Amino acid sequence: MKLSTRDMTVVSLFAVLSIIGAKVSLPILAIPFTFQFIISLLTGIVLGARRALLAQGLYLMMGLVGLPVFAKGGGLAYVLEPTFGYLIGMALGAGLVGLAVDRLDPQRTGLKPWTIVPFNFLALALVYAIGVAYLFMVMNLYVGKDMTFLKTIQVGMIPFLVNDSIYCVLAALLGPRLRRIPSLRS
């Protein structure tokens, strides 16, 4: 896979935006909300599938080699964090959204917000499917806390649904405009 200097720069920029999105947190009703999910959606919309997966993969690799880029630090042991599955889901969700926009708008000039909203929600479903399943596994098998799957959904999905749904719509409104910026094209 050959990458231009521009591609490497843009991929790195979106990896850094993912770091910032993980570190900025707003506590609402005792639940910390980060901007990671909306950044992952924008990564897919703006960069397309290949570069989005590279950016999210770079972010994950930086964290797993020990750089404190994740919300709670970094290192290989982070795979045992109950929330690590959401990071995997966001990377794959960015790739899914990127694949959709690559097909819907190959010229990068005509993407309409309403056409990408369903794919953002599909990415959200993917994030929750992987994240909740991972949370369930880690809590029950590693942490040793008996947690039913229903309780895992109540803890790992329900509190975030409204916020993440808003992110799906906001990313659909903002992403197509960013996608048309010449310097972000490959």
Image: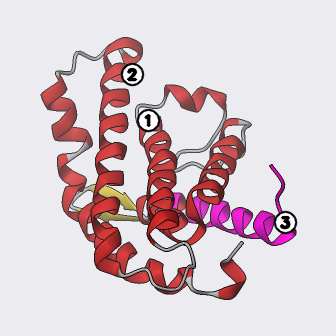
Residue 184 x, y percent position in the rendering: 67, 78
Q: Determine whether the residue tagged by mark 2 lies in a helix, strand or loop.
A: helix
Callout count: 3
Give yes or no for residue 29 being in the magenta stretch.
no
Mark 2 or mark 3: whose residue is earlier in sequence:
3
Label 2 with label 1: CB-CB less than 8 Å? yes
The range drawn in magenta is: 1-22
Quarter holding residue 97? bottom left
Question: The residue under label 1 is which amino acid type?
Answer: Gly
Q: Residue at x 28, y 47 (%)?
A: 125
Mark 3 or mark 1: whose residue is earlier in sequence:
3
Q: Within 10 angstroms of label 3, few (less than 14), some, or many (20 or more) residues?
A: few
* Residue at the spot of label 1: 85
Quadrant (top left/top right/bottom left/bottom right) for the C terminus: bottom right
Mark 2 or mark 1: whose residue is earlier in sequence:
1
Give yes or no for residue 5 being in the magenta stretch.
yes
* Residue at the spot of label 2: 138
What's the distance in space between the residues labelled 2 and 3, CA to CA? Answer: 39 Å
Question: The residue under label 2 is which amino acid type?
Answer: Val
Residue 89 x, y percent position in the rendering: 43, 43
Q: In the image, which disc is placed on residue 4?
A: 3
Label 3 with label 1: CB-CB less than 8 Å? no
Q: Where is 33 relative to 74, above or below?
A: below
Q: Within 10 angstroms of label 2, few (less than 14), some, or many (20 or more) residues?
A: many
The majority secondary structure of the magenta stretch comes to: helix
Q: Determine whether the residue tagged by mark 1 lies in a helix, strand or loop.
A: helix
Q: Residue at x 31, y 16 (%)?
A: 140
What's the distance in space between the residues labelled 3 and 1, CA to CA? Answer: 31 Å
Q: Nearer the viewer, residue 91 or 108?
A: 108
Q: Where is 114 relative to 79, above or below?
A: below
